[in-house]
Amino acid sequence: MTETTPTAEQFWEDFYRERDQIWTGNANATLVREAADLTPGTALDLGCGEGGDAIWLATRGWQVTAVDVSATAMQRGAQHATDAGVSIEWQRHDLMETFPEGTFDLVSAQFLHSPVERPDERARILRRAAEAVAPGGSLIVGGHAGWPTWAADNPPHAVHFPTIDEVIEQLDLAPGGWQVETADFVTTPSTSPDGVAGERSDSVVRVRRLA
């Protein structure tokens, strides 16, 4: 009998239900690095998970719309936001099917990697993310540049990590309408589940739509 591939919603619901908390609750370093000095306005957090990035933005004065395909993740995020005393709009979307309406001063897409990614999924979502950036606004895309050093010799599964050039190509930015402000790598400490210390490199791209 052929095993069917789970839908994105099924996969991420099962993923978040495995444990009461998956992530640390801290904002991603790639977002903090690029957004810390931006003037707060409206923000869209794509793939918000348990809300760490959205809450960080909200505490800094951003009006945040947070999106994920997993209702379980967003329920946790909403509780964390209440505990932090901030207000966030939570929307459930399978971003291949539906997308939040409107434009935003900041669109954040951090680590949109998925084991059940469909053909051209990431590129399509990133193009839609760029379309959602208001004039003068920014899009920040953070992603893994490869496996951590402790997993590089024996990766758990085959996956393609997009290069910075591939990310920029996927955004399909209109010539003359955008400025690439960051195209860089961030290296941070990383520890394996068995306690092996190492490091991981992530790519970060920040582009600004010209007014």
Image (tube, rainbow, N blue to C red):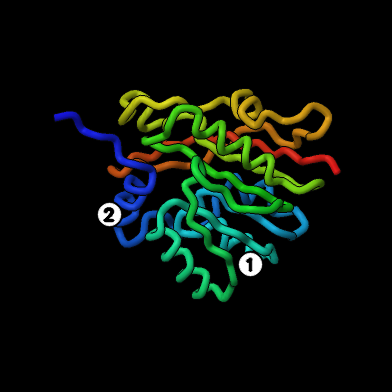
The answer to whether the residue labelled 1 contacts the one labelled 2, judged by CB atoms less than 8 Å apart, is no
Left or right? Give the position of 57 relative to 24: right
Amino acid, disc 2 = Glu
Q: Nearer the viewer, residue 27 or 192?
A: 27
Pinpoint residue 5: horizontal percent, then vertical percent.
29, 35
Q: Which residue is mark 1?
A: 59
Up the image or down, 48 lies above or below 198; here it is below
Left or right? Give the position of 136 relative to 97: right
Q: Nearer the viewer, residue 41 or 83?
A: 41
**C-alpha gap between disc 1 and disc 2:** 29 Å
Pinpoint residue 142: horizontal percent, then vertical percent.
57, 40
Left or right? Give the position of 129 relative to 177: left
Residue at x-position 76% and y-position 48%: 134
Element carrying mark 2: loop
Residue 127 position by quadrant = top right
Pinpoint residue 38: horizontal percent, then vertical percent.
75, 53
Residue 18 — which label? 2
Work out whether mark 1 precedes mark 2 in sequence or the reverse, and give the earlier one: 2
Of tags 1 and 2, which is closer to the observer?
A: 2
